[in-house]
Structures are given as structure tokens and as C-alpha cells.
Amino acid sequence: MFKNTVTDLLDTALNERLDLFLIDFSIDSQNHIKVIIDGDKGVLVEDCMFVSRAIEHNLDREEQDFSLEVMSAGATAPLVHKRQYKKNLERTLEVKTTSDKIEGTLIKATNEDITLEWKVREPKPVGKGKVTVKKEANIAFDDIVEAKVMIKF
């Protein structure tokens, strides 16, 4: 009952702000509500406050004791939602697939797959020395085990 009420309040808040989307949501046995959100243009503190208020102001602490935590997806957290890929275009990702691990720049994200691009040094086809070659890989979402944005300074 309590979880259904919270779920409805969360859905209502996210329907008001279509730029935000849910990454994770849980309620433990002590009624600790944990909500992790992301946004097409990132998440500001105000966005977390908006979702928090939408839930908290519509629950009665006299009826049900609870704690509430609303946060944004961390910079180093794996990408779990297709919309997260679209907002990270032109950033470097490390993608683990069922058979490989690739680090490259995300140049395309559709509803079915992503495209990574990277450069490698390979021996010249003729003669001595090496040449820089641009590589590209299309990876279906179904083949991705884990993907993370690589933070570069």
C-alpha cells in the first residue's frame, strides 16, 4: 500500500518533468525511500528537491514513518537507461560486452545500439613504423554488460 502510494507520487512528479527519468527506486523494510534520477541535461539540486517535495509533501508522517533520499545518478555509476547514452554523446565510454571491453568516444546512440569510435596505432601495411587508424564499433544494447563514462581531467 505505502509503496504503491510512493510509486504513484513519483510517477506524477516525473510526468510533470519529462526531462527527468528514473534510474532506481526502492523502499526497504524500515520505509527508507531511495530514489535515483537522471536528466536529459543532467540533474540539479533543484531537480532532486522537486522530486523529494512531490513525494514528501503528499505523505502523512502521522500515518506512516519514513525517510526519503533523492539523488542523481553518480558520475561513475554505470549507464543503465538508454536515455543516458544519448545525453553522453561525444564523451568517452568504457563498454564491457559479453566478449570484449572497448574504450571509445560515443558518436551515436539509437534505441537499439550505440556506436563507439577510437584510434589505435597499428603497423604500416607496407614498410616500417606505425600509422594511426580510426576504428568504429556498433554495439547492441543487448550485448552490453556494463558501460561507464570515463572521467578525464
Image: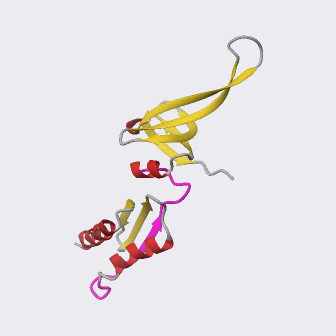
Instruction: Tell me residue 20's x, y (percent).
Output: 39, 63
Quarter of the image with the N terminus is bottom left
Q: Is residue 81 visible?
A: no
Q: Residue furthest bottom?
A: 62
Left or right of 36, for residue 105:
right
Left or right of 80, for residue 6:
left
Q: Residue furthest right?
A: 128
Q: Residue at x 57, y 28 (%)?
A: 135
User: According to the image, what is the colour scheme of the structure?
Assistant: secondary structure
Magenta residues, start to end: 60-80
Q: Residue furthest top?
A: 126
Instruction: Tell me residue 133's x, y (percent).
Output: 64, 26
Q: Is residue 138 visible?
A: yes
91 in the magenta segment: no
Give whichever of 54, 125 is nearer the camera: 125
Give whichever of 97, 149 is nearer the camera: 149
Instruction: Tell me residue 21's x, y (percent).
Output: 38, 60
61 in the magenta segment: yes
Instruction: Tell me residue 106's x, y (percent).
Output: 52, 42
Q: Residue at x 69, y 53 (%)?
A: 153
Is residue 104 shown above or below 125?
Answer: below
Is residue 20 shown above or below 129?
Answer: below
Q: Residue at x 40, y 75 (%)?
A: 50
Q: Main secondary structure of the magenta part?
A: loop
Is residue 63 shown above or below 43?
Answer: below
